[in-house]
Image: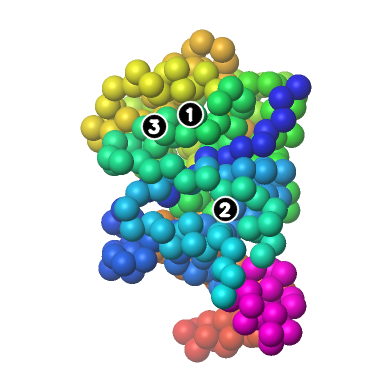
Amino acid sequence: MSRIRKAVIPVAGLGTRFLPASKAIPKEMLTIVDRPTIQYIVEEAMASGIEEVVFITSEGKSAIENHFDYDFQLDTVLNKKNKTGLREELNKISNLIDIVSVRQKKPLGLGHAIWMARNVIGNEPFLVLLGDDLVMSDVPCCRQMIDLFDKVQESIVAIQRVPMDQTNQYGIVEGKAAAIERTYKIDNMVEKPALGTSSSDMAIIGRYLLMPDIFDYLGRATPGHGGEIQLTDSLMELAGRRGMYAYEFQGKRYDAGDKLGYLKAVVDFALRHPTLGQDFKEHIQKACEKIG
Ligand code: G1P
């Protein structure tokens, strides 16, 4: 049985939905409570057993690479000041996970970004995590998908139900319930269908567990929705060839690439924070009383 050891995290996007905040700072580096959003994504991968992360980057994203690198100067200063806990926390990720960066030289779309990882991934199933989608859950979303993969041994996309008037914002999946709880065998997938053209409310969120054959399709993919090479189109081809599952994960997803989604994530993650949570809750309660 294949082990899932590698995860691809595309971070090349411009982040136009988050301007002006994302002009000089990658949107993935915007903070949720005390760490950048990208750290939550990498921590989810790590907590799911991933050993190697492949960032697909572009110009202006070096802050992300630096964030996960070992910082000799900072480490020396913290050591001198006896800040052991902080040192350990900072070094935990760089010690536990290998990070590889691949440049996507042209913004040709998500499908093209994933294709850039083909040489690092090789011939093994792998995960894809999109940086905009944060998931709060008891069992990490990727771990839930790996557990399902152990049973089905085929590609899986994570889904959630969305209101029918929002289906044009997502990749939409059609399928039939499989024998395993919360799991559907996929019949069809469409990237951002026009409203009224799909009867399904099952939207892909940014977690995929893919068989390496996906690269065969991505390598010859042509532009789809929005003139970009879409991952969903190649997924549909792969699903037709060898089967694919949609999995309604357990947990709450936040669109951290959207201003309101980001704010909701900040509030919910702050409320659950081990040291700040209680004080923050009291603040929020008082603020709500004032609003009435
Ligand atoms: C991407 C995918 C889409 C998916 C979405 C989830 O779209 O192409 O299928 O539903 O992520 O966040 P994007 O939001 O990058 O346009």
Could you tell me residue 262's position as x and y percent?
Answer: 46, 63
Mark 1: give few (<14), some (14-19) or many (20+) Cα within 10 Å: some
Task: Tell me, yes or no, whether the two marked residues, 1 and 3, touch with CB atoms within 8 Å.
Answer: no
> Does 260 sit left or right of 243 as displayed?
left
Q: Which mark is residue 118?
A: 1
Q: Nearer the viewer, residue 196 or 48?
A: 48
Could you tell me residue 280's position as x and y percent?
Answer: 62, 81
| Residue sitting at x 47%, y 46% | 101
| Residue sitting at x 42%, y 18% | 217
Instruction: Provide the residue span drawn in magenta.
Output: 74-90
Q: Is residue 272 magenta?
A: no
Whether residue 23 is situated above or below residue 207 in the rendered picture: below
Residue at the disc numbered 2: 41
* Image quarter of residue 134: bottom right
Q: Work out how far the residue at label 1 is from the one at label 3, CA to CA, in angstroms.
A: 11 Å
Q: Nearer the viewer, residue 7 or 141?
A: 7
Mark 2: give few (<14), some (14-19) or many (20+) Cα within 10 Å: many
* Three-letter amino acid code of the residue under disc 3: Gly
* Three-letter amino acid code of the residue under disc 2: Ile
Q: Nearer the viewer, residue 268 or 103?
A: 103
Q: What element carries label 1?
A: helix
> Does 193 sit left or right of 98 as displayed?
left
